[in-house]
Amino acid sequence: MAEPSAAEQRWLQAAQAFARRALPAREGPGGAAPAPVDAVLRCLRAAGGGDLPLGYSFTSVSDLLHQQSTPCCSHLTWSTNEFKEWARQGQGALPMQSSLPRAYLILVGYLTDGRQEEKEKLVDGCLYVKDNTGIIPCEILHFELEWLESLFLFPSWAYVPQTDQGAKGYVEILVDPVPVNALPKKVLDTIPVIYPAAAEPLLASRIPCKKRSKLSVAGELAKLSPLLCIHHKTFFFLFLKCFVSAVGVPVLVQKPNQLAWHHVFQLGHRYIITGLSMSSLKKSGQRVFVTGVSSCLLPYCAKQVKEQPLDSAWQGKSPQSAFPEASVQFSDSSELGVEQERPGSTKESKIISYVGTVTKILNAQAGLFELDNKVCLCLAYQQLLNSAHGLRPGACVKLIDVHLLQKPLVSFRFIVLGACLNSTVVLKSFSRLSTFYQPTVSSGNLYLQLLFRYNLGMPLYLWLVSLLETFEERFSCFFGHRRLLHSSVHQDRGAAEKFLVPLLQGMVSGREETRDIYNEMLAKRHQCPLQQYWTLDPPCQAPSLSKLCCMAKQKSWDDFCPSRLLSPSEVQHMGTQELNRSLAWSYCMFSAGSFQPRVVLLGVLRVSSRSSSLHLQDKSSTLPCVISHKDGSPFANTALIGSLLQVEAYQLVVERFLQSDFPSWKQLANVEHVREKKNSVYVQFYFEDALVLQAPEVQIQEGPRSRNSSSLRKKDDGGSASELEIPEAKVLKLDDPKPDIERNESCQRDQSSTGKNSCVSRLFLVTQKEGLMLRNYQLLGEGNGEGQELQRSFQATVLWLGRPQFWSRPRKTVNLPELEETNCHGEEGMTQQEALLLFMGKSLRWFPFLHLDGLYRFIVPHCSDLEVFDKLCFPPVPARFLSRSCCPICLPVPDTWHLQHETWISCLTERQLAAGSVLTGMEQRISSIPEVLSNRFTGSLVSFPGEIVERTLCASPKNEKPSMSLSLLQQKGSLLATDHSVKLSVSVAPSSPVVLDVYIAATYLQHLWGLLPGAKVLFQNLERKISRFHNVYCTYIASSCISIMSLPASRLPLLSSPAGEASSSSLVFLSNLQLHLQNMPQARILCHLSCVLTLSVQWVCSLCNSIFKEGKCTRHNPPCPSHIGVRQASARVLVEDGTGEALVLCRNQHVAAVLGLSLLEWEAVQNCVQSRGSVSIQHGEATGTGCVEEPEDLLACYLRSLCRSPLICRPILLDFSLDRKPSKIPQPAPLQLRNFRCGEAEFVSQVQPRPSLLCLNVEEVEQKALCCLNSERIRRTSSHC
Ligand SMILES: [Zn+2]
Ligand SMILES: [Zn+2]
């Protein structure tokens, strides 16, 4: 042999070093084996035709695991061309995927079937390659039992790491390994065997088999079950059948050292299994052959067996055929046509065999793989114990007896091949592509657990997978994958399980049958969950928030129909501006059931300091939310921040903002006039309807430990909100990155001595809260000159209750020690002091939580300075003043302080109230709407609760133009035009007549969340004003604040039509109108129409309201381009009902009714007016009302005579409301003197002033009805008297 070259020497040295590290000499069966390195080198030389593979280097198992982060393959003896050809062939199914890169590595190691852990060999059915440095799972297509524990050179292999970095991979052994040392040859004696035909009757016979000697059965492998693990016991079944017939017997393999057999078995091959006994399965009683400890698996060799004679008693009649003739027909994907679909009906799945290439891993945990780009393979029913090794894109699989399911789920695009326990899935060839693998973890796998626990059929399982996939995608960034999908048998369920289990229970209830796996594998008539299926229409969905918003927006505009927003009788008389304005703002409300399928809302509750509002959040988006309590108390639960909520009863509101230029109502159907559409979506729900799926991470610990520990300590259930720890503790835990040295000096100094969790807390009562506003404050600490910018802020006046408390750790208090304490010591004067809290910057996040009359606690984390509250006040107050409650102090709330809601003042016990004596009588600052409306009301700032009856958009009064700073605020939030304001008509209760109008400039409304008809709202600090018509109204000013107390009743919003409906009430009298109108918004009288005072019918320009004549606007300076006129009519009539008189203003269609004209006649009258623009008629007392009579013409003549005709004076039923505009609410005004004439005599009498009414409806009264009504009137009058 020639002297080795220098390169070869270096290589040999490396080989020696490798062998010392990875392959130390082992104790062989016959004493110490020769040093492995020599054998390995010999083996390498043999493989390389005498040469050493100098271009390759040795790799140890540990190097592979730790240094190889991408897939690679190594082929020791291949030429480049061979490799290229191999790689090219592997790209068939996925031409875009690159093939495995070639590495020049030599892998040498022992093949073994278990991991050594603490002197115990753990056998899980996997094979491994190990050396002295480590152990790595391997997957092999052909395996011999003699290979176990022998040293091998692997000439061709691939290493496949997991997708995520750092996770360990496995080795695919592409070519049979070469033994480094010759394997011992086994010399076999002749074995007496029986064949399945003879063995089968043995199973059928019920003869006790205790004394019977163990049997050896020889047969052809007909079926092989997957490895299963039930109750920590791993096993598998196989079937050996006769060589000549279909008779077969089942064999249960269950000894740990026999699990490696699973890798040996190949369908159609012949084997002998020795040492079998018979046993019946506990549950089902089926009888099977069972391997014993000494059982062996041997390849069948005809020369080495002789048939064992059996007792004649055991020989039964010829057995039934258990298996169909094993002529497997393989389908390919082109044959999987889609069948005719019959949704809802139960379908029978076909059992087929199939060969295909994995093209995608759809969801490894769920056991879903895509084959040939068009079929979904589901392995979940097989438990997937081998971690899906080998099942990566590019691998070829052979499926035998799998179920073919067409469209098990409406939304699922694949045909599904479901493998049950009766199916055999064989890896036919490894992938040659550079694809990662995603391991299927079987323990703690929620997909598989739920599948087995609820014995789900394929449709439900696929639905579960889609829900869980979305769930994981949406929320694992918040809570971490493990915390969310954490699954457990007991009550400590993870969020995903809490969400899914009730849904699944609802779906499977009534047909709860447990899966009988033995029956599934062994029964002659196959039974499994995949046999029957139906196309599932999912009962609900939980889409991402961004998708939900899109769906809601889409739906809201799909439903949008301009003409339906407006009442058809009114729209005809609207000018352009009014028309478009009334279309500009509308909303629609959806519930879970508005979507198909029903939408379950999931989101993490967050509060934004930027918008100072609550949000639900997932990975995709955020959705603003409004939360109320069913008892009307505001939502203040700061403990809920950061928790994952599930809500099924909610109102998803889409506010629609439309910019349009419809010239008139006739064009409403023409969408071209829509200029711009915008929307804002938010959701509102009751706290009581929300379910906490996942509590926020507990970061403030109860004990001193685990500040650094990542262990997630949770209370036993963590389900209900009351059990939550203090949330948002992130803020508390993470120190302020730049602590304000000056302010925190004392706190920091104390920290070392008191421990890091210590904090100071102080209780307070909110006595006033003001809205969010740009205010002229500077954030402390930003001391430099540019602080001129206005700061968004809000402020609240609070009353400190008791002294600050020192806590060694944050906690949730049960009672309020402060109130108890004051009681004991009786030192109220000392401890109750008013302060103005100023919230800016990050502390703005407390805005949605802080409410009037709430008792809250500030928690100052990492602090032990009890004077911290006083020290931070500004301007700095000399200590001697601090004790005086008269001195108002202003306290800017630092970002790091935590707010904790304790209770409401109304919930305090009497003892507690007595303790804080100042608290009593606190609640009286809130007025009622009648109080606000009353003349006797004094004071200009008012707070009152009320229900929104109607909301309208109106043009802002000119004198209330918003200031510049406000319009700045506007740009960020509201979608309403700045020059608009919102009018909210608010009443005490929905049917109450007493309505108070509240005007809010659009600029103040950063968002309109919750301001919907039907919502109950607490208005605070509005300015009370009186109009020129003596009506009381309120405006929203800088110090005002709104909070939503309860949500509108959950029905779809009706078109607001206050008129028309409802008025089926009983009749009232004009004389006691005042009495009635306090209880009813509208009323009905039976009256006599005395006369028509004025009548005006006109066409006005839709743009400028000038008279519109002969198709043109009459405005000339500047000329008006309008071509559209709007018909308008009004009449003022006098009615009396025997108890009094009233003026009634009628508009538009009511004019026709009052005049007794039919629709056709009215149409004709209006058309006649078109040519001359307008007609006005005056009569009697109406002089001086501003109407000028037109010169006589035919039309005027007709109308005048109509008005004066005695026919018009008739009884009518009139629905009306008070006309609040031109007159005033009837009030005890001075009586008027009026003349009456009766024949010759003239009287002067005092009479009440005539009330002004607004006509809502006119009905003719038939004679018969009149009699009835009159008699009722008389009856009621007498009862009144
Ligand atoms: Zn099946
Ligand atoms: Zn005009």
Image (cartoon, helix red, strand yellow):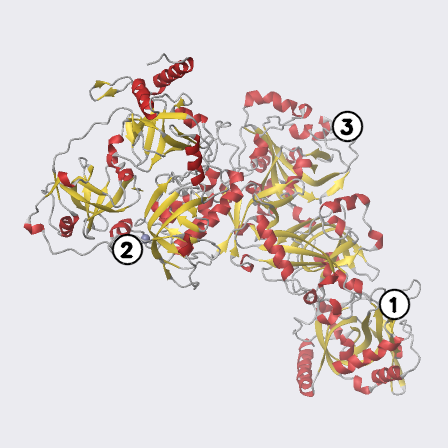
Mark closest to the chain's N terminus, 2 or 3: 2
Tell me if the residue at label 2 has its CB under 8 Å from ligand 1. Answer: yes
Residue 688 as seen in the image, left or right of residue 128? right
In the rendered view of the protein, which quadrant contains the C terminus? Answer: bottom right
What amino acid type is highlighted by mark number 1? Ser
The foreground one among 590 and 542 is 542
Which callout, 2 or 1, points to the residue nearer the camera?
Answer: 2
For the point 33% across and 55% down, which residue is it?
A: 351
C-alpha span from label 3 to label 1: 58 Å
Query: Which picture quadrant has residue 90?
Result: top left
Residue 1167: tell me if it is visible: yes
Q: Position of residue 995 (x, y in %)?
A: 72, 61
Which callout, 2 or 3, points to the residue nearer the camera?
Answer: 2
The foreground one among 1219 and 299 is 299
Query: Which picture quadrant has residue 662?
Result: bottom right
Residue 267 as seen in the image, left or right of residue 960? left
C-alpha span from label 2 to label 1: 86 Å
Badge 1: residue crowd in 10 Å (few <14, some 14–19, many ≥20): some
Residue matched to label 2: 526
Which callout, 3 or 1, points to the residue nearer the camera?
Answer: 1
Residue matched to label 1: 1106
Q: In what quadrant does ligand 2 lie?
A: bottom right
User: Pointer 2 and pointer 3: residues touching (CB < 8 Å)?
Assistant: no
Residue matched to label 3: 784
Residue 546 as seen in the image, left or right of residue 260? right
